[in-house]
Amino acid sequence: MMIEEQNQLGGLLGKQLEAVVVDPASNWPLFAEKTRELISKEEVNVIFGCWTSVSRKSVLPVIEELNGLLFYPVQYEGEEQSLNVFYTAASPNQQLVPAAEYMAKEMGCKKFYLLGTDYVFPRTANKVLKAYLKSEGVPDENVMEEYTPFHHQDYQT
């Protein structure tokens, strides 16, 4: 819809926009292959996509090698920067750290339980969060951490 509206306004820099859509079907290695095709064969100038950290990390070497441009639309774990990527959402220091600070100062929380899926984002984000908590004097024994496999559903225990 945005492309249609922009093209009705004359396009971008005098050129009509065209969407080229691919679906790597959550196959992380396929993300890199499709990115290479988009840039090399389809001559795509900008990619908007990747919804997971692993998909972004899969395409990053290709984006940098071919000097492509990626707009990554979701929060990310930080600890990565590239001249070829616009990280458009929050990183842990912009989202998790203020939440932990609020919980400690406004709600008096002294213990933290970091639960996440066994995956790139939760592990890296929790590493940042643990470092922040430690810098604020929260003892290690007051920070618990646990990771569950994808599709885990029983959190009763």
Image: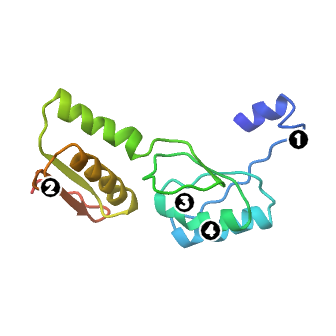
| Residue 114 picture location, percent across and down | 22, 52
If you read the primary sequence from the N terminus, does the residue marked by circle 2 or circle 3 appear first?
3
Q: Nearer the viewer, mark 2 or mark 1?
A: 2
Amino acid type of disc 1?
Answer: Lys
Up the image or down, 103 lies above or below 65; here it is above
**Residue on which the image places disc 4:** 61
Instruction: Say the numbered circle drawn on residue 15.
Output: 1
Amino acid type of disc 4?
Answer: Pro
If you read the primary sequence from the N terminus, does the residue marked by circle 2 or circle 1 appear first?
1
If you read the primary sequence from the N terminus, does the residue marked by circle 3 or circle 4 appear first?
3
Real-space Cα separation, disc 1 to disc 4, in angstroms: 28 Å
| Residue 129 picture location, percent across and down | 29, 49
**Residue on which the image places disc 2:** 140
Q: Is residue 1 shown to the viewer in this render?
A: no
Up the image or down, 111 lies above or below 117; here it is above
At mark 3, the secondary structure is helix
Q: Is residue 129 shown to the viewer in this render?
A: yes
Q: Nearer the viewer, mark 3 or mark 1?
A: 3
**Residue on which the image places disc 3:** 56
At mark 2, the secondary structure is helix
Amino acid type of disc 2?
Answer: Asp
